[in-house]
Image (tube, rainbow, N blue to C red):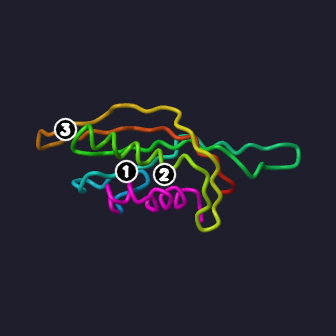
Amino acid sequence: MDFQSGVRARLLANNTVRGIVGTRVDWMTRPQKAALPAISLQTISDPRPDHLKGVDGARATLVQCDCWAATYASAMALAQAAIAALQPPATISGKKFGNARVDAQRDLGENIADGSFIHRQSVDFIIWHVGD
């Protein structure tokens, strides 16, 4: 399992996250007019550390996790559920994840065409993992 599939699987394996978003967890996009709440994910930085014997197997990848909802409280609840899902170490289909830590969390959002406002909690995770 690759890193992106593993992160998505970890979020969807969490009962609280799944109860809030169903299966609406996507990399790099949130489909237009898709139902809320939802999560969109984006890799911000993925360094490949090496040493004299080659590439190190473990690395820390910075992932932006945007939690979208119709209300501020719902966006915050989804962000807290995502944090609880991704922080502890886990192995999903053979993909090993170490501890993740929250590097930052921001209040964001946007006005949409119908004049309403979509709330977004943007959480930056540094996720330790082994392999791609």
Q: Residue 111: x percent and y percent?
A: 20, 37
The circle drawn on residue 39 is: 1
Q: Residues within 10 Å of mark 1 (few under 14, many from 20)?
A: many
Amino acid carrying label 3: it is Phe
The circle drawn on residue 10 is: none
Mark 2–mark 3 Cα distance, whole angstroms, equals 27 Å
Find disc 2 in the rendering and name its residue: 85
Q: What residue is shown at x 30% (from left), y 55% (from top)?
A: 31
Q: Residue 72: x percent and y percent?
A: 26, 37
Amino acid carrying label 2: it is Ala
Q: Is residue 46 left or right of residue 74?
A: right
Amino acid carrying label 1: it is Ile
Q: Residue furthest bottom?
A: 93
Q: What residue is shown at x 26% (from left), y 45% (from top)?
A: 69
Q: Between label 2 and label 3, give the one nearer the viewer.
A: 2
Q: Quadrant of the N terminus?
A: bottom right
Mark 1–mark 3 Cα distance, whole angstroms, equals 16 Å
Find disc 3 in the rendering and name its residue: 117
The residue segment tinted magenta is 1-22
Q: Residues within 10 Å of mark 3 (few under 14, many from 20)?
A: some
